[in-house]
Amino acid sequence: MFRGCNVALGRRILPDSRFVASKFGWASGSRRSGSSTSRFLAPTRPSRSRPTAVSLLAPRHVIPFHASARQLEVSVESPSSPEISKPYSPPTTGLLSRLPASWVPYAELVRLDKPAGTYYLFFPCMFSTLLAAPMADPVTSPLTVIGTTALFFSGALIMRGAGCSINDLWDRNLDPQVARTRLRPIARGAITPFNALTFTGIQLLAGLGILLQFPWSCFFYATPSLLFVALYPLAKRVTYYPQFVLGLTFSWGAMIGFPALGVDLLTNTAAMTAAGFLYASNIAWTVLYDMIYAHMDIRDDAKAGIKSIALKHDAETKQVLSGLAVVQVGLLGAAGWAAGAGPAFFLGGCGGAAVTLGYMIRKVNLKNVKDCWWWFVNGCWITGGAIGAGLGADYLIQYSNQGEEAKPITQS
C-alpha cells in the first residue's frame, strides 16, 4: 500500500529513530540496496523474547494514524527523492493563490510567480535608456527617463509571458520528460495547445499596444526580435548553444532605448557603436546566467535529448563562465567609451559588474539545483543593479552638468 515507506508498529520510539515492536512481535523485511521496493511487514507469533528493532531509513515526515486500536507511524521519504512523483497541487501561497482557479494555469504559463525572466528582459532596456539619455540633445529629463523605463518594464512583463507561452507550445512533448517542467500547464493538460496559442496572440497584441506608445521608429527596431523569440525553443533541439539565441532575444532592448529617447542609430555613429557594444555585452551576460540555469536540468536534458551549453561544457563550466564575464565587462566598458560616459559608470557599472560576477562564479555550486536557482534569481539584481547604478549615477552627473552650463553668466 505504501511504496518507498517504512512502517513500524510499537509503543515507543527510541532517540536513535528506531522503533521497538513489543507485545505483537511484528517483524519487517529489509530494503535491498539499489531497489525501490520493500518487503511487506509480516506478523509473527507473540513472543516474550527481546523486542525487535526496526531501523528507519531517512525519516522526513511522520504521520500518525490509527488502525485496529494500534498506532502506526509512517515515515515518508523526502519529496526530492526520485522514487516519488509529486502530483500537481494548486498554489496555496503567494499571488497565484489569490487568483480565481480558472486563471491560475494561465498565470503559471506566463511565469507570473517567477519574475526573474521579466527582470532579465527589462535590464537591457533600462541600460540602453540610461546610456542614451546623456546623448540626447538636450540631455533627457529624469521624468522622461522614468516614464520610458516604466513603459519598458510593462513591455518586458508582457513579452516575457508571450515568450514563455511560445516556448511551452514548442516543448509540450518535451516538458513531461523533465522533472522541473513536467507540471507546466500545457504539459499536464491544464491548457490545450489551441487555448495557449490564442492566449499568446492576446499577449502579442498587448505588447504591440505598449510598443506603439514609443516613437514610431521603435516599431521597426523592435519587430525583428520576434523571429528570435520563435526560434529559441527550436535551437535547443539542434545546437548545444541555444543560450546564444536566447541572448540575441533577451538583449534586444539594449538597442531600443536609443530611438525611444529620439537618438537615431542610423545617423548617430557614436550611438550606433554604443548600442552595438551594449547589445553584445548583454548577450554575453545572458549566456552566462542561463548556463547556470541550465545546470538545474542537466541530467533530464541529456535523457530528453535537449541540448545546452551546460551539457557541452559541463567539465569546464566555471572557466567558460569566467570568460563570459570578462567579455561582458569588456564590451560594457566599450559601450561606455563610445557613449562618452564618465568615471561613475566605469567605476560603478563596470567595476561593480566585475566584482559581482566574479563572486557569483566563485560561490555558485553547479551541482546543487537550489544554489543554481538562487544565483539565477538574485544575480539579475546583484549584477544588473550594479550596472544600473553606475549608468544612473553617470546620467545624473551629466544632466546636472548640463544645467550648470545652461545657467546665464551675470556680470557684477
Image (cartoon, rainbow, N blue to C red):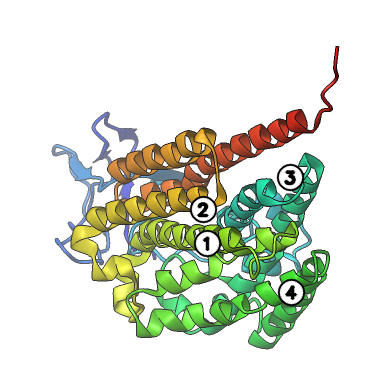
Residue 374 disc label: none
The numbered mark, 3 or 4, whose residue comes first in the sequence reads 3
State whether residue 206 is above or below residue 58.
below
The numbered mark, 4 or 1, whose residue comes first in the sequence reads 4
Q: In the picture provided, is 387 more to the left or to the right than 157?
A: left
Q: Are marks 3 and 4 in contact (CB under 8 Å)?
A: no
Q: Quadrant of the C terminus?
A: top right
The Cα–Cα distance between marks 4 and 1, rounded to whole angstroms, is 20 Å
Rendered location of residue 122, percent (x, y): 62, 56
Q: Which residue is at the front of the view, 155 or 304? A: 155
Q: Amino acid at mark 4?
A: Phe
Q: Amino acid at mark 1?
A: Thr
Identify the image quadrant of residue 350.
Answer: top left
Q: Which residue is mark 2?
A: 338
Q: Are marks 4 and 1 in contact (CB under 8 Å)?
A: no
Neighbor class of circle 3 (other Cα within 10 Å; few <14, some 14-19, many 20+) is some
> Going 33% across and 64% down the picture, which residue do you hit?
83
Q: Please indicate, yes or no, whether residue 11 appears anywhere in the rendered image.
A: yes
Q: Which residue is mark 3?
A: 139
Q: Quadrant of the N terminus?
A: bottom left
Q: Which residue is situated farthest in the bottom direction here?
A: 194
Q: Amino acid at mark 2?
A: Ala
Disc 1, SS: helix
Residue 273 disc label: 1
State whether residue 245 is above or below residue 111.
below
Q: Which residue is at the front of the view, 327 or 385? A: 327
Rendered location of residue 102, percent (x, y): 76, 69
Q: Which residue is mark 4?
A: 219
Q: Are marks 1 and 2 in contact (CB under 8 Å)?
A: yes
The numbered mark, 1 or 2, whose residue comes first in the sequence reads 1
Closest to the camera, between mark 3 and mark 4, is 3
> Going 77% across and 47% down the picture, which residue do you hit?
138
